[in-house]
Image (cartoon, rainbow, N blue to C red):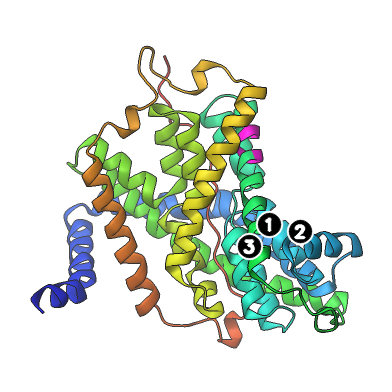
Amino acid sequence: MKKFRFLRSFPFWCGVAAGAAVLLRPQAAAAGVKNGLALCAGVVIPSLFPFLAVSSFCARTGTPKMLGTLTRVLFRLPPCAAPAVLFGLLGGYPVGCKTAAQLERDGLLTKEQAQRCTLFCVNAGPAFAISAVGELMLRQRRAGLLLFVSLTAAALMLGVLLRFTAAAPDRAAAAVSPAAPAAALVQACEAAAGAIFGICGWVTLFSCWNALLAGSALPAGLKTALLCLTEVTAGCACAAQRANLFTVAALLAWSGVCVVCQVLPQLKQLGTPLPLFLCFRGAHAALSCAVLWGLLRLFPVEQAVFSTFAGQTAARSFSFSAPAAVALLGLCTVFLFDVERERPDFTRSPLKKGKTHAKIESPSTGRREK
């Protein structure tokens, strides 16, 4: 019984520890918040707001017949689910979940269909995978292109596998009249503007977390593990310096605790079990590495992409304790379950209807040269 009491109070003491860290290192916390706000103004809003607005607009105005046919044949989803699939693969991590939740609220998708969308329509956008990770972190555009192709192919594979778990969509139920373009544009703009507030909140919070973590006295391996598990941009920057291309692909597919927290409102609205969502994040990572292995045999990249230190092996990032890594992953899972249980449901609020969160895809140039 005492153990269960400790688990119930564990989030409280984590909050106390975080508050103490902010009080003990206020300058680092303030610098992290400022950096997060600067990223929101310079990267998040310019890059994500248009995609959020466009995806919402397309979801309300109908789907072309060709895209609808592909969605039905490949994923056994109604044609109206095409925007969720398309923008989930191209628009950035949470855009697909947000679009699927909106379609379910509008009565175009059933909960079961929208749940399936949330399991595979979570992917890094081409701007982040190719430009930020490939060109800026790995210094090779081909490497970023191979990463994006492997991630997208793995997501499509998961979607095709999920089709065998569902019945064929009802054609009559899917035939819903699209909204007028003018009304759809107004609603899309309002929904995207509401989503940006939540996005910026998570970006600022994890930017503060990264600043406090960077100045802590933790071992270097432990810092790397925490960054890789929690925040995809910082994790990919560390993996680009110390690991190989497969590690980068796995981190991009996993997406991090920050992205998982951003899609929690949509998962809660649709009833998608969090353990199932996390399992599919792991399956996406494994499939991405498998596809990448095949692509590298056809389109090899230079050895410099795999390691920035001469003479080091590609397993450098896993040189820390394996039990410690498992324990950290377990703590992150406990944190996610607590956030899902305690987080208030704002999805039904009329002022925040259609709200979602998206992950920042900010480039990082941190890399040690040979």
**Residue for badge 2:** 74
Neighbor class of circle 1 (other Cα within 10 Å; few <14, some 14-19, many 20+) is some
Residue type (three-letter) at the residue carrying disc 2: Leu
Q: Earlier in the sequence, mark 1 or mark 2?
A: 2
Neighbor class of circle 3 (other Cα within 10 Å; few <14, some 14-19, many 20+) is some
Q: Is residue 107 left or right of residue 69?
A: left
Which quadrant holds residue 13?
Answer: bottom left
**Residue for badge 3:** 162
Q: Nearer the viewer, residue 182 or 121?
A: 121
Q: Is residue 351 left or right of residue 36?
A: right
Q: From the viewer's perspective, is residue 276 above or below residue 123?
A: below
**Marks 1 and 3 close (CB-CB < 8 Å):** yes
Secondary element type, mark 1: helix
Cα gap from disc 1 to disc 3, whole angstroms: 5 Å
- Residue at 67% x, 80% y is 110
- Residue at 55% x, 44% y is 287
**Residue for badge 1:** 160
Secondary element type, mark 3: helix
Image: magenta residue range:
145-149
Task: Check if residue 140 falls in the magenta segment.
Answer: no
Q: Where's the N terminus, which quadrant?
A: bottom left
